[in-house]
Amino acid sequence: MPTNTEEGFATKAIHAGQDPLQWNHCPVVGPLVMSTTFRQDDAAEHRGYEYGRSGNPTRNMLETCLAAIENGKHALTFASGLGANTALGALLESGDHILSVDDVYGGTSRYFRTCLSRNKIDITFADGTNVKNFVNSIKENTKMVWIETPTNPLLKIIDIRAIVDAVKAIRPDIIVVVDNTFLTCYFQKPLELGADCVLYSLTKYMNGHSDIVMGAIIVRSDELEKRLRFLQNALGIVPSPFDCSQVSRSLKTLEVRMKQHMIGGLAVAEFLESHPQVIRVFHPLLPSHPQYEIAKKQMSGHSGMVTFYLKGDSRKFLKALKIFMIAESLGGYESLAELPSVMTHASLTQEARDELGINDQLIRLSVGLETQSDLIADLEQALKASQLARAAETNKNE
């Protein structure tokens, strides 16, 4: 019987880039190198590092680990997720076109609409769940296709392999980017499904402690890595060594954290789906999800993200929560709740929000690592408070 020599996910996350023998004193935990510059043996003769913006040993350890757990070849880190977006946008030239799924993070949409458009880069947003209609939006000048799956905030599942195959059949040179922030490489590996670039806001699940802002891009192509590495340095959107050391620490527990996020998130989704004050729940592991079969095919699990439409007063619901905190962002150990229409997606026009279904009844949850029964009890009492507030308002108007 053949032996599988491929290392497991947790083994890679703990050991990739962490070889103690690369340092004189063999530290088990790689050192935090804060120096902004490095002594050279002679003019223009250095030992791998010369200036902190162009390279840093602590950052290199993190990038090596990220490439390994993604099953990629190269990883590049940036000062934020939108910093990574900026680097990808800088691959394009005036007159180029991006085709993006319509239900994307509000910051991504804002960057496309208000920043790239100033450089005369054309943007089209289309529903990625309909592969045929989506690829029909490809133009002669399309240079990049942007996928986010699950989408933010409605958790639509986009068939990565189907879109990649359709796009590459039209023109192989189009760069396909997948924002994998909601799932991480533990539950989904877009490069193995044909994507050219995987994008992360490491701020979220990958770091998982709500204390670092950072982004990353992982690729397999040497040519893409060369172009992005130049932009990483030229644009100066690099993370600090301290932040890199913190994310390196967090990756060691990514597997155990994501398993627990999945358990808690699914329990919350099942509770909400059975509650009379909830109109509809979006969670890819629920059989009621429109793309449930695609989710089973391309994902090995799901994170703690749950979205639902509420019958009652959404603001009363949020204010009544005691464990869930009203806050933007996601993926930390703490549970968060938000109203996308006025928070993460407030930059969208009212027309765009209406078209996507992002209204004031839509709640997005990031289920953390607290005790499951406590989270459900918190949601139950907040739903009751929302129901009572709505009933009181109805009686007042009668």
Image (cartoon, rainbow, N blue to C red):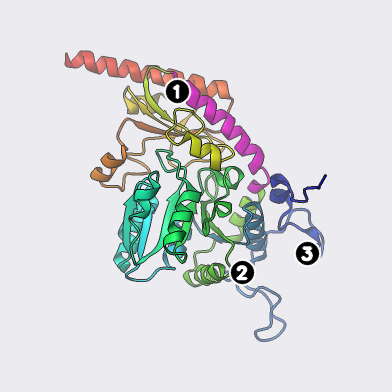
Q: Is residue 137 left or right of residue 265?
A: left
> Any mark on residue 22, and which?
3
- Judge the density around disc 1: few (<14), some (14-19), many (≥20) Cα neighbours within 10 Å: many
Mark 1 to mark 2 CA distance (whole Å): 47 Å
- Element marked by disc 3: helix
Q: Is residue 353 above or below residue 283?
A: below
The mark nearer the N terminus, 2 or 3, is 3
Q: Is residue 192 above or below residue 115?
A: above
The mark nearer the N terminus, 1 or 2, is 2
- Judge the density around disc 3: few (<14), some (14-19), many (≥20) Cα neighbours within 10 Å: few
Q: Amino acid at mark 3?
A: Gln
Where does the magenta region start and end?
250-274
**Residue receiving disc 1:** 272
- Judge the density around disc 2: few (<14), some (14-19), many (≥20) Cα neighbours within 10 Å: some
Q: Residue furthest left?
A: 398
Q: Amino acid at mark 1?
A: Leu
Q: Is residue 61 above or below residue 360?
A: below
Residue 110 rendering spot, x and y as whole percentages? 34, 54
Q: Do the CB atoms of the residues marked 2 and 3 lie less than 8 Å apart?
A: no
**Quadrant location, the N terminus:** top right
- Element marked by disc 1: helix
Q: Is residue 107 left or right of residue 37?
A: left
Q: Is residue 28 left or right of residue 239?
A: right
- Element marked by disc 2: loop
